[in-house]
Image (tube, rainbow, N blue to C red):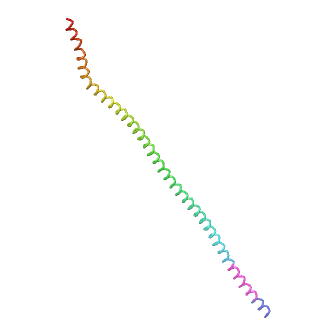
Amino acid sequence: LLKLSLMLSELLKLSLILTELLRLSLMLTELLKLSLMLTELLKLSLILTELLKLSLMLTELLKLSLIDTELLKLSLIDTELLKLSLILTELLRLSLMLTELLKLSLMLTELLKLSPIHTELLKLSLVPNKLLKFTLM
């Protein structure tokens, strides 16, 4: 009976140890579940990091797009300046033509001033002819 009691005691001890092992196994299972969750969180964190990188790239692309837009605006301004330059060149050409016309107008004015003198000279040149006529008469 004593042996049986000792064996029963040993069995109880073993049963307690087994129970403790089962409890530890359950804890380990919970830890494994938590580890899996942590792994998933890390994966999500990596995905988030990639999304942030993409967001930064998009921001840079938007900045470049804005710069490109500004360059296009400057190009349009440059085109307008070239058009204005062409208009100015044409105006300068017309101004030169006007200057030439004014010079010609001044020459004409001088000629018109000389015209009465020329008329008088012609009259005076007719005087000897008239005198000759009178003398011949």
Q: Is residue 63 magenta?
A: no
- Judge whether 95 appears above or below 74 on screen: above
- Judge whether 127 appears above or below 66 on screen: above
Q: Is residue 16 magenta?
A: yes
> Which of the 4 quarters of the picture holds residue 19?
bottom right
Picture coordinates of residue 5, whole percent (x, y): 76, 91
Residue at 28 percent of width and 27 percent of height: 110
Of 80 and 91, the residue lying toward us:
91
Picture coordinates of residue 123, whole percent (x, y): 23, 17
Decide if residue 76 is on the left or right side of residue 112.
right
Residue at 22 percent of width and 8 percent of height: 133
Q: Which residues are magenta?
A: 10-24
Decide if residue 15 is on the left or right side of residue 109.
right
Residue that lies at the very extreme toward the top in this rendered image: 137
Residue at 42 percent of width and 43 percent of height: 81
Picture coordinates of residue 95, whole percent (x, y): 36, 35
Picture coordinates of residue 118, whole percent (x, y): 26, 21
- Judge whether 52 appears above or below 70 on screen: below
Image quadrant where one finds the N terminus: bottom right
Of 51 and 10, the residue lying toward us:
51
- Judge whether 61 appears above or below 109 on screen: below
> Which of the 4 quarters of the picture holds residue 112?
top left
Of 117 and 13, the residue lying toward us:
117
What number of labels is visible? 0
Residue that lies at the very extreme toward the front in this rendered image: 135
Image quadrant where one finds the C terminus: top left
Decide if residue 11 is on the left or right side of residue 133.
right
Q: Main secondary structure of the magenta part?
A: helix
Residue at 53 percent of width and 55 percent of height: 61
